[in-house]
Amino acid sequence: MKESNCIFCKIVAGELPSNQVYQDDQVIVFKDINPKAPVHLLMVPREHIISLNELQSQHDSLIAHCLRLLPQLAKQQGLNNGFRTVINTGAGGGQIVFHLHIHLLGGIVIFTHRCT
Ligand code: DGP
């Protein structure tokens, strides 16, 4: 399930380079090319899923896998004081690469707004 014009599919396939920090049979994780924090990783499912809007029940175990992996990676990156995750969805949500991915950020105070 590879999309021929998708940058992240090409990175997953090894056709484009990336600074990879983790991989398994479901996801790869690499450094964002335009980091917004000292640690800025992208967790990318190997399967080409466009965004959260396209998730189906068949993806439940993949999503659980991703969420459980995030704190492990944060710890591995030395983020012992917490980390931030971001999933941009659709053009209106700031999504630029239309292959589902989770941003993992940390290392400085990066919060520009709070809900409370
Ligand atoms: P967004 O779709 O807005 O959630 O963000 C996409 C992110 O992907 C953005 O922070 C920059 C990053 N990015 C885009 N192209 C590449 C690439 O070829 N390599 C890497 N490592 N990151 C990329």
Image: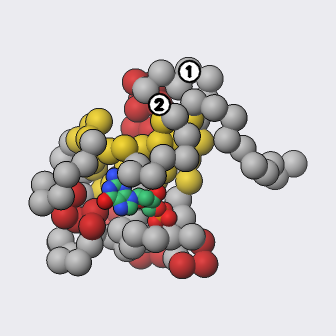
Residue 13 image offset from top left, x and y in percent: 13, 59
What is the count of numbered marks? 2
User: Which residue has dot 2 on it?
Assistant: 74
Whether residue 32 sits left or right of residue 45 in the image: it is right
- Work out which quarter of the rendered image holds the N terminus and state it: bottom left
Whether residue 107 sits left or right of residue 23 in the image: it is right
Query: Could you say which is closer to the camera, residue 34 or residue 40?
Result: 34
Q: In percent of the image, x 63 and y 32: which residue is there?
A: 108
87 in relation to 29, above or below: below
The answer to whether residue 12 shows anywhere in this view is no
Badge 1: how crowded within 10 Å, few (<14), some, or many (20+)?
few
Name which residue type carries label 2: Ala
Q: In percent of the image, x 28 and y 63: which residue is there?
A: 8
Q: In percent of the image, x 47 and y 31: which residue is there?
A: 74
Whether residue 32 sits left or right of residue 88 in the image: it is left
Name which residue type carries label 1: Asn
Distance between the alpha carbons at the discs numbered 1 and 2? 7 Å
50 in relation to 113, above or below: below
Query: Could you say which is closer to the camera, residue 15 or residue 114?
Result: 15
The answer to whether residue 114 shows anywhere in this view is yes
- Residue furthest out toward the right: 116
User: Which residue has dot 1 on it?
Assistant: 80
Q: Quadrant of ligand 1?
A: bottom left
Q: In percent of the image, x 21 and y 42: which residue is there?
A: 24
Query: Could you say which is closer to the camera, residue 107 or residue 12?
Result: 107
The tag earlier along the polypeptide, 1 or 2, is 2
Residue 88 image offset from top left, x and y in percent: 54, 64
Disc 2 is placed on an element classified as helix
The quadrant holding residue 21 is top left
